[in-house]
Image (tube, rainbow, N blue to C red):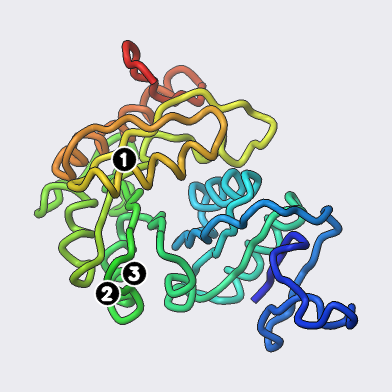
Amino acid sequence: MIRARTRGQYRPRTPKAPHAQGTARPRHRTIRTSAALDSRPVPDPICIVGGTGALGFGLALRLGRAGVPIVIGSRDATRAEEAAARAARQLPEASFDGLQNADAVQAAETVILSVPFRNQSETLTNLKGALREGQLVIDATVPLAAAVSGKATRTLAVWQGSAAQQAEEMAPDGVRVVSAFHTVSAALLTDLEHELDEDVLVCGDRREDKAKVTALVDQIPGLRCVDCGPLEMARIVEQLTALIISINVRNKARTGIKITGLNR
């Protein structure tokens, strides 16, 4: 596992022993930064399953820059470590861990699921024993036809109604699912020089869960959450990804969605 952490995240056990500073588990190699000591409370970590992919890695960078500790999950622990190291090189002041998926989801209360649709079912099956009651899964999966060698401008029919509803059906009891991040460009998230200015459409059955997602999204400058209603509305939001891809191809652009007429 590779970590990049800001100083101050761990307190020394013995003030007189500088070498004791940092209580990270000794069996892991740690990358430390030279950032100044920060007295602000450290936010809860966020796990991104599929954090080695374009969207997941972009979210890791943006949230990491906002001060959120990030745990990047992958089926391959080595790939997760490499992604964490790559993120740390871009943002040495941030905190990134790289772990195999089952270990990654146990390190956070909130899990962003950012995997291709063809891998969603297998990933959730493998995580049944790792996810636990009380966790929140933010599903960003889109059932694009590209998953079965079709066009990225088309979507597949999902028996449950949407990829998010499939995730909810497969998640262990007590694990809640919210749908989000389908219309945000992975390329723009990764481009840290780009100033974001778009909305994140959120679907979920519990207001408390959507409020938690909103608080997380609010940490990324330029993004605003819009409550789109219950989880069943995800079937419509997921379709918008294919629409945006079609618009981008025809206009050679990187577009997003912004809902007008809303008060903050």
What's the distance in space between the residues labelled 2 and 1, CA to CA?
Answer: 26 Å
> Mark 3 = which residue?
123
- Would residue 35 appear left or right of 194 to someone viewing this image? right
Farthest residue toward the front? 15
Residue type at tag 1? Lys
Residue 149: x and y, percent?
32, 51
- Front position in the image: 88 or 13: 13
The first of marks 1 and 3 along the sequence is 3
Label 3 to label 2, Cα distance in Å? 5 Å
Local SS, label 2: helix
Residue found at the very far bottom of the displayed protein: 27
Q: Amino acid at mark 3?
A: Thr
The residue at the point 52 percent across, 49 percent down is 54
Looking at the rendered image, the disc whose residue lies closer to the viewer, 2 or 1, is 2
Callout 3: helix, strand or loop?
Answer: helix
In-image side of 127 versus 216 (left or right): left
- Residue 238: x %, y % from top left: 26, 39
Residue type at mark 2 is: Thr
Quick one: label 2 or label 1, which is nearer the N terminus? 2
Image x and y of residue 165, in percent: 17, 53
Q: Which residue is mark 2?
A: 125
Residue found at the far top of this picture: 261
Q: Which of the pair 253/98 is nearer the observer?
A: 98
Q: Quadrant of residue 72?
A: bottom right
**Residue 47, above or below 56:** below
Q: Nearer the viewer, residue 108 or 155?
A: 108
| Pointers 1 and 3 in contact (C-beta within 8 Å) | no
